[in-house]
Image: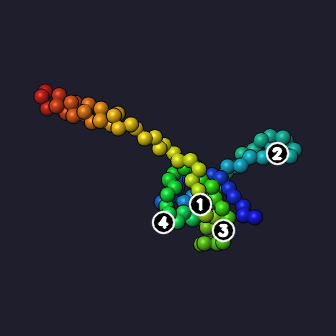
Amino acid sequence: MLRTLTGRVINNKMMKTVVVEVESSFVHPLYKKKIRTRKKYKAHDDKGVSQPGDVVKLVETRPISKEKRWKVSEVITRKGIVEKPVELEIKEVKEAQEAKEVKSEV
């Protein structure tokens, strides 16, 4: 049985490696207060598809390097991918051209 974790990518500046922050919570046995903990894991991202802000699923694997023991199995959600309709992009280009023309006339 492979262990899996879910976390958010916070850094992808290394080659084929991402840093993933996994947040977990538990209730303190004596004080009954909910405690949140965060831990950073270095994970192998062979294809280099994950970006900071993405939520990814990690799977435990054999040691790949000194600190890498996890591998990115899938990207669950992407951060900030919203595609604009083509009509809006055309409008923005036309408005920018009109603004340039007005500045050049003045």
User: How far apart in space, not on screen, are marks 4 and 2 (Cα)?
Assistant: 39 Å
Name the side, left or right, on which 80 lies relative to 99: right
Of labels 1 and 4, earlier in sequence is: 4
User: How far apart in space, not on screen, are marks 2 and 3 (Cα)?
Assistant: 31 Å
Q: Could you tell me if the residues under marks 1 and 2 are in contact, i.e. CB atoms within 8 Å?
A: no
Of labels 3 and 4, earlier in sequence is: 4
Look at the image and tell me whether residue 42 can be seen: no
Closer to us: 80 or 13: 80
User: How far apart in space, not on screen, are marks 1 and 3 (Cα)?
Assistant: 10 Å
Q: Secondary structure at mark 3?
A: loop
Q: Could you tell me if the residues under marks 4 and 2 are in contact, i.e. CB atoms within 8 Å?
A: no
Label 2 neighbour load within 10 Å: few <14, some 14-19, many 20+: few
40 to 81, vertically: above or below: below
Say which residue label 2 marks.
28
Of labels 1 and 2, earlier in sequence is: 2
**Amino acid type at mark 2:** His
Of badges 2 and 3, the one in the foreground is 3
Say which residue label 4 marks.
15
Q: Secondary structure at mark 4?
A: loop
**Amino acid type at mark 4:** Met
User: How far apart in space, not on screen, are marks 3 and 4 (Cα)?
Assistant: 18 Å
Say which residue label 3 marks.
61
Closer to us: 92 or 29: 92
User: How far apart in space, not on screen, are marks 1 and 4 (Cα)?
Assistant: 14 Å
